Image (cartoon, grey):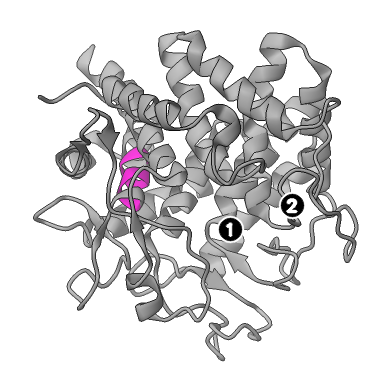
Amino acid sequence: MKHSALEYAAQACEAIMTKYSPQELPPKGSFFYHQGVFLSGMERLYELTGDRKYFHYIKEYVDYVLGPNGEVYGFCHELGKREESRFAGKELTMLDCKQPVILLYKLYDETGDEKYMNAIKTIGESMYYWPVNEYGGYWHMMNQHNQMWMDGAYMCGPLSVKYAKRFGATVLRERAINQIFIMNEHIKDVKTGLYFHGWDPAKKARWANKETGRSENIWGRAVGWYAVAILDMLDDIPQDHPAVERMKQIEADLLEALVKYQDPETGMWYEVLDKPGAEGNWVESSCTHLFVYSYAKAIRLGIISKEKYAPVLEKAYAGCVDALYYDDKGQLVVDYVCVGTCIDAGTYEHYINRGCTQNDLHGMGAFVLMCTEMEKYRQVYEEK
């Protein structure tokens, strides 16, 4: 039996809530984007349903990973200085460890607890000191000098513009917008209109092309994060800002480029986006979820045409639903999700040989984000 998008989102959240207490969400005890992405989807489900169990689940996770006064350890405030994480037992010196801060705004607004505001300011202010390459691009990790990865747009972009909107930190907003433009200028593949996974302007990374500095392959989920980042950033950038129209055009161009690579049979997209027929390549769920989210939101916001892109959206969403199944306990399973993936050597074999998993947090998070956005899309167009 098929369910509504909102029902699928609730089933996905229920599957994770049944398996993990908030304190056990993996990687346990860490302030990390795996939890942040999933709980961002849950937060949107809370906004759509008003069901407080979602709010309390998010709150319990955040309360577990923050100190009593909102301490967040592991962020580098000075170039070359590192602080060990009190909770995760590792150094949180990557952009991925900042993303969950977007959860703290609603917690603060609904509770007034200053520890959330302290954490928001700790992470927001840390962006002033985060190292950049000669083009102004944020390093993705502290130990990988100069390197920009496409997923970094999502890890730091929405949090920066949200912080700027709340506190007037226009410098951080402009830096975040500039990340989008740098990636568009230096990481985009002009032949396909898609984006390589990473770029090292110094051309020293082992995966970097010696002429362009770009990595050699186009990884689906990284492109998905970029598409989502632009749309979510636009929520918190003033609509009369001079960068808005350019950002919308970049989004529209990417969504147009993706159409060519949609699998005609399943409606989904592949692990290595631009090589759908290559040996060993496989249809990957999480990138498809992020693309469905992006088509639905871009149509809803008037960035792209419903008449032109609704068939692409509906085919992809149907493919995602068709790939779902239920385990022997009746819990929803989201399958064919690529595990977390660094660039490493950047070879085609590296990507297609990555593990495939079910119901991991960033895959399930992408699914819930997709479902909540599809619900908004349906509300707009089914009510007319």
Estimate how packed mark 2 is, as few (under 14), some (14 to 19) or many (20 or more) residues with alpha carbons within 10 Å: few
Q: Is residue 184 left or right of residue 251?
A: right
Residue located 37% across and 45% down the image: 290
**Dot placed on the residue nearer the N-terminal end, 2 or 1:** 2
Image location of residue 59, percent across then percent down? 63, 21
Label 2: which secondary element = loop
Is residue 228 visible in the rendered structure shown here? yes
Does residue 102 sit above or below 155 in this rendering?
Answer: above
Residue 291 falls within the magenta-colored stretch = yes
The residue identified by callout 1 is 181
The residue identified by callout 2 is 89
Does residue 306 sit above or below 81 in this rendering?
Answer: above
Residue located 76% across and 44% down the image: 172
Amino acid type shown at disc 2: Gly
Q: Measure the C-alpha gap from mark 2 to mark 1.
A: 35 Å
Q: Specify the quadrant that holds the N terminus.
A: top left
Image location of residue 161, percent across then percent down? 67, 37
Q: Is residue 373 left or right of residue 68?
A: left
Magenta residues: mostly which secondary structure? Answer: helix
Q: Specify the quadrant that holds the C terminus.
A: top left
Mark closer to the observer (2, 1): 2
Does residue 17 sit above or below 358 in this rendering?
Answer: above
